Amino acid sequence: MAASLIFGLAPAWRASRPALSAVLGDGARGSMAPGRRRLADALVVGEVALASTLLVGTALFLGSFIRVMNVDLGIDREGVLNFQARLPRTTGTSAERLATAHQAIGGILDRVRAMPGVVSAAALQNGLPMSGGRARYSVEVAGRPSPFEGDDLADGHFVTPDYFRTLRITLLQGRTFTQDDRAASPRVVILNAEAARRYFGGRDPIGAKVSTGPGENTVIGIVATVRLTGPEGPARPEVYWPFAQGSSTFSETVARVAADPAATIAALPSLAPLLLDGKPPVVKTLDESFARLTAERRFNSTLMVALGALALLIAAIGVYGMMAAVSVQRTPEIAVRVALGATPAAIRGMLLRHAGALVVCGSGIGLLLAWMLSRFVAAALFGVQPHDGVVYAAAIGVTVLAGVAARLVPAIRASRLDPIVALRQ
C-alpha cells in the first residue's frame, strides 16, 4: 500500500505544479522532458538489474535442487515401505528371549512376503536410511595399533539376508548374508565401499579380521555406500552384521512392492496381533523420508523461481512500457524521418538501440550485484559454485532475451507508422 501511494502520488504532485516553459516547449511538441526521460531510463535499468540478480539466484538454487534430486543414494527408494516391529515381552533367560524375538521377527517377515504386491522383505536394527536413527561403532583392524574413532566411526546395522536385495544395494565384492549366518556360526561382517577405503586403503579387505560391535568379525563382502542421512549428507563408513548375530529384540521391517502399495498397506493391519500394543503398524515409505529431507530445498527453489519469474516479468513490462512511451513521444520525429525516406528497418534500429543499451546496462549491474552477493548464499548451495560462469551466462541470456521480446513489438509498430496520418495529428 505504501508503494502504491508513493508512486501514485508522485506523478499527481508533479502534475499539480507544472513548469510552464516545459509545457509550452518540449511538452507542446509531444516529447518527453529530459529529466523525466532520464528517470524512466533509470527505472528500467533498475528493473533489469533486479531481474538479473534474482535470476542468478534462481539459477543457483534451482541447480542445487536438481543436483540434490539426482544424488546417487546407494539405494532404490521407490516402492519401499517400512514400519517398526515392537514385539510382546517374553519370559525366560536372555538367550531364550532373544531366540523367541528372532523367531517372531522371522514370522512377521514371512507374513509380509505373502502379502499382495510384495517382492521382498527384510528386517534391520539401528536405523533405516534417511530415518534419522543410527548407531556408531569404533573399528579395529588386525595389524593396526589403534582403532578407528572420531570421524572414522562406523554406522552399524544388523540386517537379515534379504536386506540388500530389498533396498537394491549393489554388491561390489564377495557375498552377502545367507540363512547359514546364524547366531552360532562364525561372526562375519560386510563393509560398504567407504569403510573399505578408509580402513584398508588399497588392500583387499575380503577375509580380513575387524573388531567392532559384537567382537571380532571376518569381512565377507563389500557393498555400495548408502547416503544414510539423505542426499546432502556425507559418505559415511558402514558395517553390516547378520541379524541373527545381534542381541536386540526390536527391529524395523522394510518391504519392496511391485506396483501400487495400497493393497500391501491394506493387508498390514493383520500383523497387529503379533506386535506389542496390538495395533496396526504405522507405515512409512522411503519416498516420504526423502521428501521430508528435501522439503526445505524444494521450498527455497520454488520461492526463488517465483521471485525470478516475477522480477523478469516486471522488467519486461518496464521495457515494453518505456519503448511504447518513447514511440508515442517521438511520433512526429518518426513521421518526418519516414517522409524523408527512412526505411522501417532504420526506424526499428533507432528505437531498439536505446532500449538495448538500457537492458545491457541493467544486466551488467545485476550480474555485478549477484557476483557480490552470491558469497552469502554459498553455504546453501549444493554441487554448484556461487560464481559458476554457466549460471551467469544463462541468467544474462534470459534477461536480454526477455528485453528483446519486450522492446520488439513497440519498435515494429512505430516502424509501420503512416507519416501523413502522424503529421496531421
Image: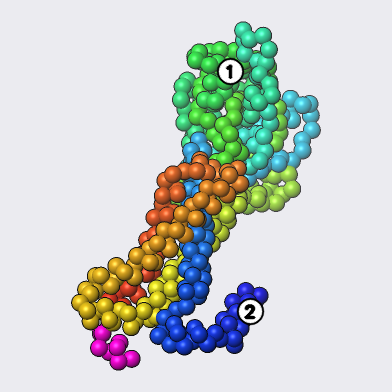
Residue that extends furthest to the bottom in the rendered view of this protein: 424
Q: Nearer the viewer, residue 88 or 53?
A: 53
The picture places residue 137, in percent across and down from the top left corner, at: 68, 24
How many numbered marks are there?
2
Q: For residue 276, which quarter of the picture?
A: top right
The amino acid sitting under disc 1 is Tyr
Residue 232 spot, x, y in % from top left = 57, 40
Q: Nearer the viewer, residue 354 or 62?
A: 354
The residue depicted at 64 percent of the width and 29 percent of the height is 155
Q: Above or below — where is 378 with respect to 347?
A: above
Which residue in the protein does label 2 denote?
A: 5
Name the spot of residue 254 as percent of width and height, x first.
57, 41
Let me know if residue 340 appears in the view: yes
Categorize mark 2 by other alpha carbons within 10 Å: few (<14), some (14-19), many (20+). few
Which secondary structure lies at badge 2?
Answer: helix
- Tell me the quadrant of the picture where the N terminus can be found: bottom right
Which portion, as a residue range, is magenta?
417-425
The residue labelled by disc 1 is: 199
In the picture, measured across the screen, residue 289 lies left or right of residue 137, that is: left
What's the residue at 33%, 91% (across, down)?
425
C-alpha gap between disc 2 and disc 1: 68 Å
Dot 2 or dot 1, earlier in sequence: 2
Q: Amino acid type of disc 2?
A: Leu
Considering the numbered disc 1 on the image, is that residue within a helix, a strand or a loop? Answer: helix
Relative side of 45 to 410, left or right: right
Dominant SS of magenta comes to: helix
The question of residue 134 being in magenta is answered with no
Position above or below: 3 against 140: below
Residue at the location (54% across, 34% down)?
A: 226
Please identify the quarter of the rendering in which residue 98 is found: top right
Are the residues at dot 2 and dot 1 in contact (C-beta closer than 8 Å)?
no
Q: Is the image coloured rainbow, by chain, by secondary structure, or in one colour?
A: rainbow
